[in-house]
Amino acid sequence: MTKSKIVFAGAGDLASRAIACLTQHKSHVPCVALSRREKSITNAQSLLGDLTDDAIWAQVKDIQPQAIVVTLVPNGEGAQGYQHGYIEPLEMLIEQVKQWAIAPVIIFASSTGVYHQTAGEQVDETSPTEPTGYSGLCMLQAEQLLASSGLPYCSVRFGGIYGPGRDFLIRQVQAGKGGGPDFTNRIHQDDAGRCLAFLVNQYLTYKNLPNCLLACDNEPASSHQVRTFIAKKLGLSAEYLQPSPSGRGGNKRCLNARLINLGFTFNYPTYREGYDYVAGNT
């Protein structure tokens, strides 16, 4: 067990994809996945327990991880579900890790929901964050907990994650909902997993990461623009789509220059590559 150097707090889809990247071929990096429920992730050791219980973190301490990748989800409905799913486990993690002789880096999967901008502005890691919704407020609180912890950390602000199995937008198009002019930002689920694995490897190599990174693809695009593309791939006419609310995410353009400058490359650099695949496999 002591050979396992990377711990994932949360064993969902994002963690599974990152672990697959870290454990492939000669670049194998041993991983352990922590979860509240029994889950099996290929090529990772599973550790079952409540992430708000100090007992599981005592086991993690014995692993001596070089990085802890935090990929949590809400544990219940509404604001309380976010508090239980994100803040309480993160508070326990920070409390425990601060007592260790050697602290691992904490890589936290956050969200562009921390941004409040809604007028099509460009935003980057230095832009103001004043969210009003409970999910954005929770993510910002989590980031602030890490920032004030004194531990090495990197908060990764993911755009909307999409890909096979995440077909909400495709169903919207099939229902004739064409969206509107608001800018939206996204990242393919494969690239999201690859991004986390990339950051782990960056830290293992250089022992340094930015405290904040935006993880969105190269092209913010209007909701209507993306839906029109999907409609074409589905063989639907442009006239089939009718204007509709754009949905979550506000109206902003997220810039990924900091991530690109680290050396990360996208397999799906825009929605065209991503939805060409998704729409063709629904």
Image (tube, grey):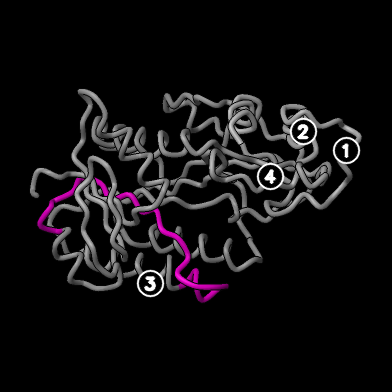
Residue 10 is situated, as x and y percent measured from the top left of the image, at 35, 56
Q: Secondary structure at mark 2?
A: helix
Counting the numbered discs, the total is 4
Residue at image mark 3 = 88
Q: Which residues are magenta?
A: 61-83
Q: Secondary structure at mark 1?
A: helix
Density class for disc 3 (Cα within 10 Å; few <14, some 14-19, many ≥20) is some
Mark with earlier residue (3, 2) = 3
Circles 3 and 2: CB distance less than 8 Å?
no
Q: Quadrant of the C terminus?
A: top right
Residue at image mark 4 = 169
Circles 2 and 4: CB distance less than 8 Å?
no
Question: Residue type at mark 4?
Answer: Leu
Disc 3 to disc 2, C-alpha distance:
42 Å
Q: Secondary structure at mark 3?
A: helix
Where, by quadrant of the figure, is residue 31 drawn?
top left
- Which residue ends up furthest to the right in the rendered image? 239
* Tag in front: 1 or 3: 1
Disc 1 to disc 4, C-alpha distance:
15 Å
Residue at image mark 1 = 240
Disc 2 to disc 4, C-alpha distance:
10 Å
Density class for disc 2 (Cα within 10 Å; few <14, some 14-19, many ≥20) is many
Question: Residue type at mark 2?
Answer: Ala
Disc 1 to disc 2, C-alpha distance:
8 Å
Residue at image mark 2 = 231
Q: Residue at x 49, y 72 (%)?
A: 76
* Tag in front: 1 or 4: 1
Density class for disc 1 (Cα within 10 Å; few <14, some 14-19, many ≥20) is some
